[in-house]
Image: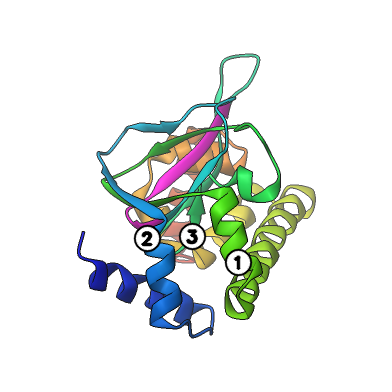
Amino acid sequence: MDKEYLITSLSNIAGQHGVSISKELLGEIVSISSFRVVNKGEVIRNVTEKNTTAALVLAGMCRAFYVDEDGNDITRGFSIPGTLCMDEGMFGYSESIVTWETLEETTLMVFEVAKMKQIILLSHDLKNIYIKLLENALQYKIYRENGFLVESAGERYLHFKKLYPMICNKVKQQHLASYLGIKPESLSRIRKALKESHSFPE
């Protein structure tokens, strides 16, 4: 991939977090990274694999999921452009606790966790972005736990669709349903009822 294109892409992602990063620093990040274009439906990391690397999604979409003791495929979350995937290593996990797959053709910037953390610690701007990523991850966790505690299935769906319309419109119903903690047929009924009541036209 063209280095200038990659630097521009990273600069745009930093701008989404309200941070401006020098071209030199972005070039350093690019130099320690590799770039992969992965076909739709490929597993990019299996559960229990080592987390020495992580990745930033530049295009496409990924899903993190696990299989419970009854064999049910349960979605833990989705990664869209500008967010991390295979990122447990960035949060201290030595092994992956989920399986990661691509939901469409996806472009990844893959980097070694240890090297990236070294660069982050030496840059005030990157520290700010990292703090925002950590805050977003915590807010996402709190929001999801709160939804299971106080919201109905329909409310959880509406809330998620409001926050992430692109995900709702693209992913398979079974993946979205398992993320929301309901059966696919229940999600279908919710969507139908909302459409018929004009509360939230599809």
Task: Residue 33: give its label.
Answer: none
Q: Nearer the viewer, residue 192 or 152?
A: 152
Q: Which mark, residue 120?
A: 1
Residue sitting at x 59%, y 37%? 182
Please tell me how crowded label 2 is: few (under 14), some (14-19), or many (20+) other residues with Cα within 10 Å.
Answer: few
Q: Residue 154 at what x, y percent from top left?
A: 60, 52
Query: What's the CA distance linking mark 1 and mark 2?
Result: 14 Å
Q: Is residue 150 left or right of residue 1?
A: right
> Upstream in the sequence, badge 1 or badge 2?
2
Question: Does label 2 or label 3 sit earlier along the sequence?
Answer: 2
Q: Is residue 61 magenta?
A: yes
Q: Is residue 118 left or right of residue 58?
A: right
Separation of marks 1 and 3 at Cα, in angstroms: 16 Å
- Please tell me whether residue 188 is drawn above or below residue 9 in the rendered image: above
**Residue identified by numbered label 2:** 31
Question: SS of the residue at dot 1?
Answer: helix
Mark 3 residue element: loop
Which residue lies under the disc numbered 3? Answer: 83
Residue in the image at 49% along x and 60% along y: 83
- Splitting the image into 4 quarters, where does residue 31 fall? bottom left
Q: Is residue 177 visible?
A: yes
Say whether residue 162 is magenta: no
Q: At 62% across and 54% down in the image, what residue appears?
A: 156
The amino acid type of the residue labelled 3 equals Thr
Q: Quadrant of the N terminus?
A: bottom left
In the image shown, does 177 or 40 lie closer to the viewer? Answer: 40
Q: CA distance from mark 2 to mark 3?
A: 19 Å
The magenta region covers 57-66
Residue ranking furthest to the top: 70
- Please state the horizontal and vertical placement of residue 178, each as a whole percent of the image: 55, 36
Mark whose residue sits in front, 1 or 2: 2
